Amino acid sequence: MTALAIGLCLLVAALGAIGVASPPRFLALIRSLTSLQGFYAIAVFRVAFGATLYLASSDARAPLLLRVLAILLIASAVATPIFSHARYRQVIDWWAAGGTLYVRIWTGCAIVLALLLIFALLPASGDS
């Protein structure tokens, strides 16, 4: 399960790298997910990512941190219908209006978070 969790973290980091390198391309990708199907696909991804982090946490360097983040991811996905598709689109538009620097900062943060999660997923030193 750890390998799958690391793979999902690498996917998030790769998406972040696209955002840092080419904010317009990243925004086009995000806007392609503003359909109702994309809205729910992102929720399903958050559930899967959260479940994977939770299941991989027992062998990890920082199990409590991973479990808390996993629960937050799953809770955010479960709350998706409350958030509403229309509000989701408004948030994407607001976020995109911040400009390329804003997009680069946030996607850079996604890269850092993904790399920190990978570090947290690794076994503690001496446990290899």
Image (spheres, helix red, strand yellow):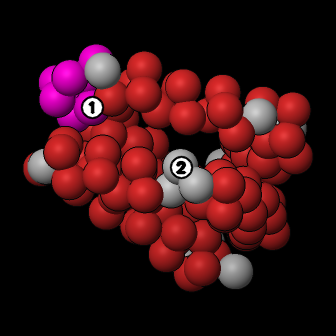
Q: Work out whether mark 1 precedes mark 2 in sequence or the reverse, and give the earlier one.
A: 2
Relative to 49, is 14 on the left or the right? left
Query: Residue beneath label 1, please?
Result: 103
Does the stretch in magenta take in 104? Answer: yes
Seen at 31% across and 63% down, the residue is 14
Compared with 96, 69 (above or below) is below
Question: Could you tell me residue 16's position as x and y percent?
Answer: 31, 50
Question: Could you tell me residue 99's position as x and y percent?
Answer: 20, 23
Q: How many marks?
A: 2
Seen at 53% across and 69% down, the residue is 8
- Numbered tag placed on residue 34 in the rendering: 2
Question: Could you tell me residue 1's position as x and y percent?
Answer: 70, 80
CA neighbours of label 1 inside 10 A, class few (<14), some (14 to 19), many (20+): many
Tell me where residue 103 sits by quadrant.
top left
Q: Which residues are magenta?
A: 98-105
Prevailing secondary structure of the magenta residues: helix
Q: Give amino acid for label 2.
A: Thr
Q: Give amino acid for label 1.
A: Val
Relative to 43, is 33 on the left or the right? left
CA neighbours of label 2 inside 10 A, class few (<14), some (14 to 19), many (20+): some
